[in-house]
Image (spheres, helix red, strand yellow):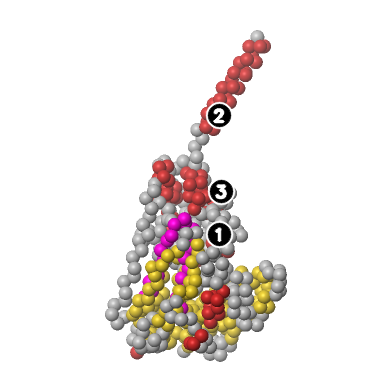
Amino acid sequence: MRQNFWIGIIGISSLLAYQSCQKDETKVISSFDLIQTRIFNTNCALSGCHLSNADPAFAQHNLLLTSAAAYSNLVSIAPKNTNAVKDGLVRVKPFKSDESLLFHKLHASGGDHHIGDYGNPMPLGLPLLSVGQVEFVRRWIEAGAPREGKVVQDEKLLDDSTLQPEEFEPLQPPALGTGIQLTLGPFTVAPNFEREFFVYKSIGNTEDIYVNRVEIKMRQNSHHFLLYDFESSFAPSSRPPLNVVRDIRNANGSLNFLNMLPMAYHVYVAGAQTPFSDFSFPPGVALRLPANMALDFNSHYVNKSLTEITGEVNVNLYTTPSQDVQKVALPLNLGNNSFSLPANQKTTIIKHYLMDKKTNIVSLTSHTHQLGEKFVIKIKNGPRDGEIVYTSTDWHHPQVINFSNPLILLAGEGLTSEITYNNTKSVVVSFGLTSEDEMGIIFGYYYED
């Protein structure tokens, strides 16, 4: 009897173990796990992107998409993109794909998705996700974006190879008499390569023009485009030759320091870090560009794919009659050329710039070299003393802030630059013109009353 009892127990245990194994073998993979393994791990959680907090871009997006971190970093979490925050988006909002920044970043095609406001479409430097992959993500969000459970039934969407169209349509030139169009490219970007270059080009104006709006459009995988003038102290005879491409990286990826030297004399004119940008000066304010003007065009494209890609930039400079200009925008160029950074340590350099008359600032950006870790601009003196008005954590591609309502500084008030440098070198680094030296400059535009 006792033997039969134990045989029965063993039999039941074996049956339960068998059933347990069967359940394990048929365990349902959650929809989020499919997104993680089929999309994030292969397109996003890559070195230099969203793999580690040591990635160069991490300070900008503060987003890891590794298996251990992705879900908690996405669902119901506020983004760092200021335009997305202003529009009420979160990274992933359950049941609301249109209010989820992730969906907008992945769904790069279609004019109703405001990629021009929310930054580059993703993945940057790689082909866009397929139509099916984006639809899978959308359905997951609309189903509540759960961590567990199979809420998207059609897994074949992830196998779809129909890529989203890039849909690059060149800007239509301004109507005759209302502005001029500038173009760069098409040009090639080699496989697995970041191409950044300058070209000093005439803009073709035979008389003074007043620009009150700048529209910029770029192909997929552009990191940024900028237009620069040169400081008046930089003699025309020393400036780069016209229409000569000056790549800052050699074919092997090393830096071409000679082509970088003119950057020390740049004065910011206009730019964008998104595929589309449309900036207007406040009413009655315009930027004067003198007759026969030339500007230094700066384009940066990222190609992480195994095939060559094409880059292209269109810029429309819209003009207004001189009699309609009440205030002329002037370049803001506030630089500190007297500092040193001790070896192997972080140092914060603070510099104050006071205004001698009322100043109305309409645009701010910053410039450091590779040791610049964080650039903060604060108001100095007056009732708003200490208020932060600008922050950038990417030295290579600094934030550009345009004020719809001018930032007004009265005489005696000013701006403070508070720059944190991380000198990882074994030597002291000081101000200088090469990329091995350092800088700390506030660029922007303002007008006076």
Q: Is residue 312 magenta?
A: yes
Decide if residue 25 is on the left or right side of residue 214: right
Q: Residue at x 56, y 83 (%)?
A: 334
Residue 166 shows in the view:
yes
Say which residue label 2 marks. 21
Q: Looking at the rendering, in which quadrant would you find the N terminus?
A: top right
| Residue to which mark 3 is pinned | 67
Residue at point 58% right, 60% down? 55
Q: Is residue 50 left or right of residue 339?
A: left
SS state under label 2: helix
Neighbour class for label 3 at 10 Å: few (<14), some, many (≥20)? some
- The crowding category of the residue bearing disc 1, from other C-alpha atoms within 10 Å (few below 14, some 14 to 19, many at least 20), is some
First along the sequence among labels 1 and 3: 1
Marking on residue 48: 1
Which amino acid, by three-letter code, is at mark 3? Ser
Q: Is residue 286 magenta?
A: no
**Amino acid at the residue labelled 1:** Gly
The furthest residue to the front:
251
Please provide percent x and percent y for residue 145. Answer: 47, 48
Q: Main secondary structure of the magenta part?
A: strand
Start-end of magenta stretch? 295-316
Residue found at the far top of this picture:
1
